[in-house]
Amino acid sequence: MKERTAKFLGTLTVLTITALLVLTVYAFGHSWYPVECCTNIHCEAVPCDAILETTTDYVYEGMHFVGAQVKPSMDSMCHACWDHVWKKPMCLFIQNSV
């Protein structure tokens, strides 16, 4: 019985550590996105040349990003955040040259 319990606790410990590592890596991948833009599932890097600047907004994949939704990117890439089910734009992070 003790051997079975020890094996179970060892397996549980390994699974817990693995889950924490995966969640930590995932969280750091989105660490600079503001909360209003991303809940760790909405944002992804996108090609900057796929973003169209108009006189009133920026358009990516048919979604229009306006005003406060458009922000400077914190890295060398562009990023779009949207509700993938409803295609609702949330935030667009652009480079100065876009």
Image: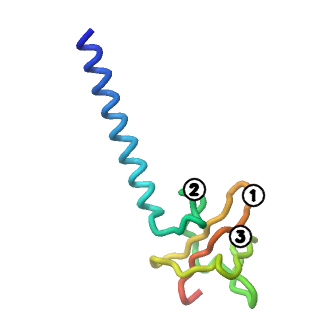
Q: CA distance from mark 3 to mark 2?
A: 17 Å
Extreme residue toward the front, this view: 35
Identify which residue is drawn at 40% across, 41% down: 19
Q: How many other residues sit within 10 Å of disc 1, few (<14), some (14-19) or many (≥20)?
A: few
- Work out whether 97 lies above or below 9: below
Figure quadrant of residue 53: bottom right
Residue beneath disc 3: 61
Left or right for 7, reference 42 = left
Amino acid on which the number 2 mark rests in the picture: Ile
Label 3 SS: loop
Q: How far apart in space, not on screen, are marks 2 and 1 (Cα)?
A: 13 Å
Q: Indicate left or right for 27 with 94 as reference.
A: left
- Location of the C terminus by quadrant is bottom right
Residue type pointed to by label 1: Trp
Mark 3 or 2, nearer chain start: 2
User: Which label sits on residue 86?
Assistant: 1
Q: Which mark is residue 41?
A: 2
Secondary element under disc 1, as helix, strand or loop, is: loop
Instruction: Name the quadrant containing residue 16.
Output: top left
What coloring was used for the rendering? rainbow
Q: Amino acid at mark 3?
A: Glu
List the single residue furthest toward the top.
1
Asked if residue 81 is positioned above or below residue 20 in the image, the reply reads below
